[in-house]
Image (cartoon, rainbow, N blue to C red):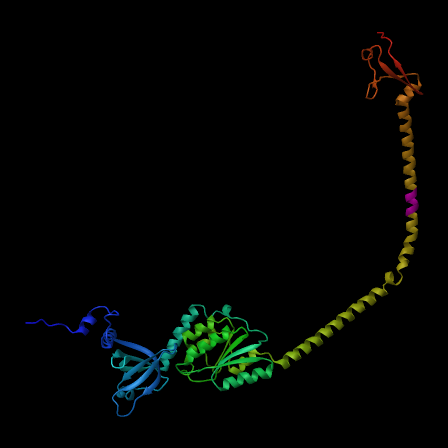
Amino acid sequence: MTSATPPASSQRSSGASSAEQPWPVRTVSAKVAGWIDRLGSIWVEGQITQINARPGTRTAFLVLRDPSADMSLSITCSPQLLHNSPVPLTEGSRVVMFGKLSFYTGRGTVSLRVTEIRAVGIGELLARIERLRALLAAEGLFDPRLKRPLPFLPGTIGLITGRASAAEKDVVSVAHRRWPAVAIAVRNTAVQGPTAVPQIIEALKELDANPVVDVIILARGGGSVEDLLPFSDEALCRAIVACTTPIVSAIGHEPDSPLSDHVADLRAATPTDAAKRVVPDAVAEAALVADLRDRSAAALRSWVKRESHLIEQLRTRPVMASPLLAVDRRAEEVERLQAAGRRDVTRLIDSESRTIEHLRARLTTLGPAATLARGYAVVQRVVADGDPEVLRSVEDAPPGTQIRVRLADGAVRAAVMGREK
């Protein structure tokens, strides 16, 4: 009796793969199918971009795209599910689907087999926009302090709009009419549908990175709520906030108010209004310059006239008409004051001279010269290498001491011969 040996494929699938024991395609496909099958049923939201439901077939094929990213998912369902929908499903419809992911091992593809499709109505879309509006407002993205000022005269304007659209023609024609030298960098993108948001975000990044672009206009004509949905997308709103270049949102008409209007630096009612707000009118600016020139010239003339009148008034005053008259009137007073000053100075000098004479006489009387003149003498001891010292005691002049005797008319030198007490 022989034992049963498991097949080689079972052995390889039970362990890890390696270069020596690789897994065959069927094993990999089976494992992927098993993993995907464990996900179970899910709800998915997106926008239908393609519907392929041929008559007589048992399966309809759809493509469901994420409106905020360049991602899509293949969908399969029964054609009756499309026909029995209470709301007609067309390309561009926003839907919510319920189904289960399946991996087709024969083709190696993944698709979602749906059993229920619900169209997202206008009310639900508006409710979602309001919820997103509240979220962005709570984050402070609508704060006016975040708004960047527009340049007075942009050198280059970035324009994101639909190809050959009326919005593009309006912006370009109005901008060139108001300021012919302005340059416009146009980026044509989808402005509705599932591909609009990724294309607009890519164009925003490109223009924002261009250093010559001073301002970006996001323009689109009017449309239904569904047509304007891309401009209320969260990813687009955050991309607008992240730009460093000022953004002008000109979406739809005056009543339309997508979320891009609130996060942009400036909201324009229409594309034409956006061009008028971004580009100054050359004719109006020239008229303003001429008016300012005239007003400044008039102000200067008025100032010169006023100052000339003031100078004339000053010149007619007596002090300016006859400047020496005041001097002549004060000449007598000056001469009188000069005489009084001379008298006072002379009187002071005489008084001080008399005082000096009295002091001189007293000093002469009390001085040593007067004493010497009366017969007295001053005896001084001669000190070598020094000044003579006055003798005050016989003890200071031993015999042989050189002395100097000062008299009224001179001095004599002598030597001490002896001492007497």
Q: Residue at x 91, y 46 (%)?
A: 338
Please determine whether, in this image, residue 339 is positioned above or below residue 174: above
Query: Which picture quadrant has residue 225?
Result: bottom left
Tell me if 255 is positioned left or right of 56 in this view. right
Please determine whether, in this image, residue 332 is positioned above or below residue 77: above
Q: Residue at x 73, y 72 (%)?
A: 299
Instruction: Give the x, y percent position of residue 202.
Output: 45, 76
Q: Residue at x 60, y 82 (%)?
A: 178
In the picture, the quarter occupied by the N terminus is bottom left
Tell me if 393 is positioned left or right of 33 in this view. right
Query: Which picture quadrant has residue 10?
Result: bottom left
Instruction: Give the x, y percent position of residue 106.
Output: 25, 81
Instruction: Give the x, y percent position of residue 339.
Output: 93, 45
Q: Main secondary structure of the magenta part?
A: helix
Magenta region? 337-342
Please determine whether, in this image, residue 4 is positioned above or below residue 371: below
